Image (tube, helix red, strand yellow):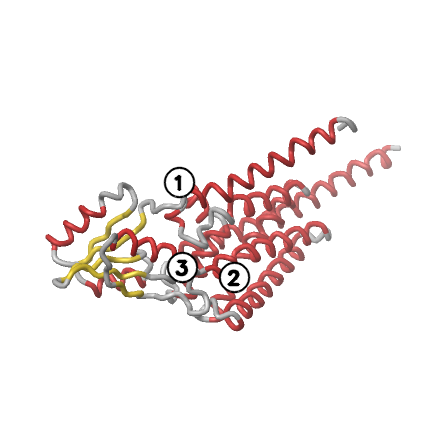
Amino acid sequence: MSATRRPLAVALLVPLLAALALWAFAWPAARTAPRDLPLGVAGPAAAVAQTEQRLSRHEGAFEIHRYADEAAARDAIEDRTVYGAIVVTEQGPRLLTASAASPMVAQLLQQAVAGDTPVPSVDVVAAPEDDPRGAAFGASVLPLTLAGIAAGSAVTLLGLRGARAVAVLVAASALVGIAAAAITHSWLGVLTGDWWAEAGALGLTSLAVAGAVAGLAALMGPAGIALGAAVVMLLGNPFSGASSAPQLLPEPAGAIGQWLPPGAGASLLRSVSYFDGAAATGPALTLTWWAVLGLGAVLLGSALRSRTARTEQTAERKPALTG
């Protein structure tokens, strides 16, 4: 690239990246609204039908699940099948929420159900007292992403390959999980579940990102670092729904976010920290696939490099033998 074109390329690339980042972060925040948000309704059939009719006015906002009674609705909330439930009783409706699943959703349900008339509500699975609005929980996703990018980049730039690189990535991610659990659980009180399960979820999230970055770099060279970092930073973080909920993000951002490590990591961490592991299988498998594919790419890239090096050495020896 000529000296004249370089400044022009920079002048065009920087605004493009800024626009992309602004779109990725601002668009979901500006379009936050419920979209097929799972909501339970329990009570007598006639009363439930009336409640469903009122909720249908919010077109496309809620995905209604019917339950026989309040106990069944509570179980569904604790199993993370729904975010809340409306229980119709003789005394009137009562709202069940789970601020641990999303304080924003709990507040939204109170506004949507109550309207101008106050409705009694019960927080079935409450958010921690030290983080009632979920701000600290939402802020925990970015450091894990940065740690994963840093680990994947460091392994690549230090020239570590093959099994040695995999071992370093696994060890670094395990230490990240332990350190993060010590801060968020033991010190800040943001997480309240099983300590080691939380450390495992945090470490697996970091490993998924680290494996993706290092794996792409092993196959593509240094450009793989930029590609991996861009995907998890510009798409993974703003589409994660960690500070709100995937169903509050515009489509298809919420769905995409759950297939990327930050979103899957946030969902897994909520499950193990507040819901005794309910609904943890899906996000755990997503993170595991990212980690396995990423580490597999590291091993594959190392094998391909070794094969290329042996081929080049053989090609250099042949002329010498012929001479």
Secondary element at image label 1: loop
Mark 1 in CB contact with mark 3 (< 8 angstroms): no
State which quarter of the image contains the C terminus. top right
Tell me the number on the disc at residue 280.
3
Residue at the spot x=78%, y=36% of the render? 315
Q: Secondary structure at mark 2?
A: helix
The image shows a total of numbered marks equal to 3
Q: Position of residue 100 (x, y in %)?
A: 38, 62
Find residue 270 and report its image quarter: bottom left
Name which residue type carries label 2.
Answer: Leu
In the image, is 24 to the left or to the right of 172? left
Q: CA distance from mark 1 to mark 3?
A: 23 Å
Q: Earlier in the sequence, mark 2 or mark 1?
A: 2
Residue 51 place in picture, x, y as percent: 18, 51
Residue type beneath disc 1 = Glu
| Residue 201 position within the rendered picture, expressed as x and y whole percent measured from the top left | 49, 62
**Along the polypeptide, which appears first: circle 1 or circle 3?**
1
State which mark lies toward you, 1 or 3.
Answer: 1
- Residue position marked by numbered label 1 in the rendering: 251
Label 2–label 3 contact, CB within 8 A: no
Numbered tag placed on residue 322 in the rendering: none
Res 10 quadrant in image: top right
What x and y, as percent, mark residue 73?
A: 24, 61
The numbered mark, 2 or 3, whose residue comes first in the sequence reads 2
